[in-house]
Every structure is written in structure tokens, then in C-alpha cells.
Image (spheres, rainbow, N blue to C red):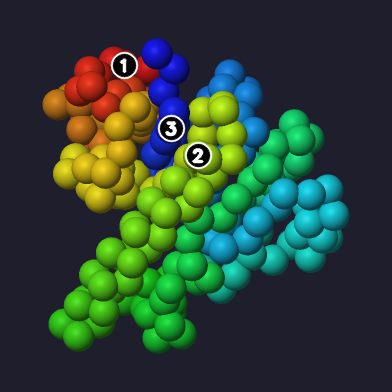
């Protein structure tokens, strides 16, 4: 049975994420691609695509360059590209600065961050359900690898999914490169099977 949801684990650039994204999008040929990095923007018309390609701005947290290739691919293939997150991922100016500059957070900021992440994951989930109702084709969903970890909100709530992401030797999603280890993509399906991609 075709999976309803095809998740692609985004590494935030420790790999060239676009190579895998392009391969999956071209083989799945979806009506919608949902993207965490597009934040709350919706590119569902030629006009909206042309506007963003001209403006070249996403937000303080996401540079246009990070997502430019994905925008152009979906535009050329006439696929609607939908942001499924909050503007600036829900971070206030203080958190934006600290996260972008990899500064350590205070205990209060850590708590705030945990709360925001929970809200973001609920938002991802509700957007996925919303767009699943709008199409008969599988949804391709691009999310940071961390959101696809074992026991994550989405993996607990959804079934009939396939995750394509960098995996470790135990078949679990990895969030950062391990020194001297080759990184390989693999597949995890909701029925628990795992294959090397």
C-alpha cells in the first residue's frame, strides 16, 4: 500500500538535503509538499511563487538561499509548497539571536523553547491532517530530523507513513554527523520495517 505521508528528514545542512528532496519529490510527484523551513508561507499560485522569487526573503530564521532550490523545483513542477510552521519558528527576538549564534540558553529560556517545540509539533500535525484531506496523492513532508525521532509526536500520532532520513546502524534517525562515520539514508515505515535507501 502506498504511504499517505512521505517524510524527508532535513539535516539543516550537514548533508546536501536538496539532492534527496529532489529525488523523492520527482518520484512521488505530489500535489503538495509541506515544509517546516517555509515557516507559515503558502506558495499555492504562480503569483505567490513569483512574488517570493522576486522578494527573496523568508524570515530572520530561514534565509532564502536555504530553500531557494526547493522553491524553484516545486514552482517548475507546478507543485504547491506549503509552510507548516510558525513565523521564525515561534521564537522571539532573544531566542532567535541565541539560537542563530549557538549561544547557551538560561534555564527559563530552555523551558520556553521546550514549550514552543511542543506547539510547533502540534501545528505540523494539524497542517498535515488539513492538507491530507485536500489530496488523494501522498503528501511529501520535509521536517528537521529531530521531529522524526523515535517516540516523536508525529510518529506517535500518524500511521501509514514512510520516513526517509539519515539513519544510524540501529536504524534510528540521526540529528548530527558522527566523527568518521559515513552517513547513509534509510527508510523507516510505520509498520516498523527499515531499509537502507
Rendering coords of residue 194 (x, y %): 25, 19
Rendering coords of residue 71 (x, y %): 69, 46
Could you tell me which residue is drawn at 68 percent across and 43 percent down?
A: 80
Mark 3 highlights which residue? 5
Tell whether label 3 touches label 2 (CB within 8 Å).
yes
Question: Depth check: 88 or 69 in front?
Answer: 88
What element does badge 1 sit on?
A: strand
Q: Quadrant of residue 59?
A: bottom right
Give the alpha-carbon distance from disc 1 to disc 2, as whole Å.
Answer: 27 Å
What element does badge 2 sit on?
A: helix
* Label 3 environment density (alpha carbons within 10 Å; few <14, some 14–19, many ≥20): many
2 or 3: tag closer to the N-terminus? 3
In this rendering, does residue 99 appear at all? yes
Image: 188 above or below 120: above
3 or 1: tag closer to the N-terminus? 3
The C terminus: image quadrant: top left
The N terminus: image quadrant: top left
Could you tell me which residue is drawn at 20 percent across and 85 percent down?
A: 108
* Label 2 environment density (alpha carbons within 10 Å; few <14, some 14–19, many ≥20): some
Q: Mark on residue 132?
A: 2
Rendering coords of residue 154 (x, y %): 30, 45
Left or right of 58 in this view: 12? left
Q: Mark on residue 99?
A: none
Give the alpha-carbon distance from disc 2 to disc 3, as whole Å.
Answer: 8 Å
Could you tell me which residue is drawn at 39 percent across and 39 percent down?
A: 9
Could you tell me which residue is drawn at 26 percent across and 44 percent down?
A: 157
Give the alpha-carbon distance from disc 3 to disc 1, as whole Å.
Answer: 18 Å
Mark 1 highlights which residue? 196
Left or right of 11 in this view: 158? left
The nearer-to-camera label among 3 and 1 is 3
In this rendering, does residue 22 appear at all? no
What element does badge 3 sit on?
A: strand
Amino acid at each position: 500500500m502506498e504511504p499517505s505521508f512521505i517524510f524527508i528528514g532535513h539535516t539543516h545542512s550537514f548533508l546536501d538535503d536538496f539532492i534527496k528532496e529532489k529525488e523523492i519529490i520527482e518520484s512521488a510527484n505530489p500535489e503538495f509538499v509541506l515544509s517546516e523551513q517555509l515557516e507559515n508561507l503558502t506558495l499555492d499560485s504562480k503569483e505567490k511563487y513569483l512574488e517570493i522569487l522576486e522578494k527573496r526573503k523568508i524570515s530572520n530564521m530561514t534565509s532564502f538561499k536555504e530553500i531557494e532550490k526547493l522553491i524553484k523545483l516545486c514552482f517548475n513542477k507546478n507543485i504547491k509548497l506549503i509552510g507548516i510552521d510558525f513565523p521564525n519558528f515561534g521564537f522571539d527576538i532573544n531566542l532567535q539571536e541565541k539560537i542563530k549564534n549557538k549561544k547557551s540558553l538560561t534555564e527559563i529560556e530552555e523551558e520556553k523553547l521546550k514549550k514552543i517545540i511542543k506547539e510547533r509539533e502540534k501545528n505540523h500535525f494539524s497542517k498535515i491532517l488539513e492538507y491530507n484531506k485536500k489530496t488523494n496523492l501522498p503528501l511529501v513532508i520535509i521536517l528537521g530530523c529531530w521531529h522524526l525521532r523515535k517516540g516523536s509526536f508525529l510518529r506517535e500520532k500518524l500511521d501509514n507513513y514512510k520516513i526517509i532520513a539519515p539513519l544510524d546502524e540501529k536504524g534510528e534517525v540521526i540529528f548530527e554527523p558522527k566523527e568518521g562515520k559515513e552517513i547513509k539514508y534509510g527508510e523507516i515505515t510505520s509498520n516498523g520495517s527499515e531499509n537502507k535507501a
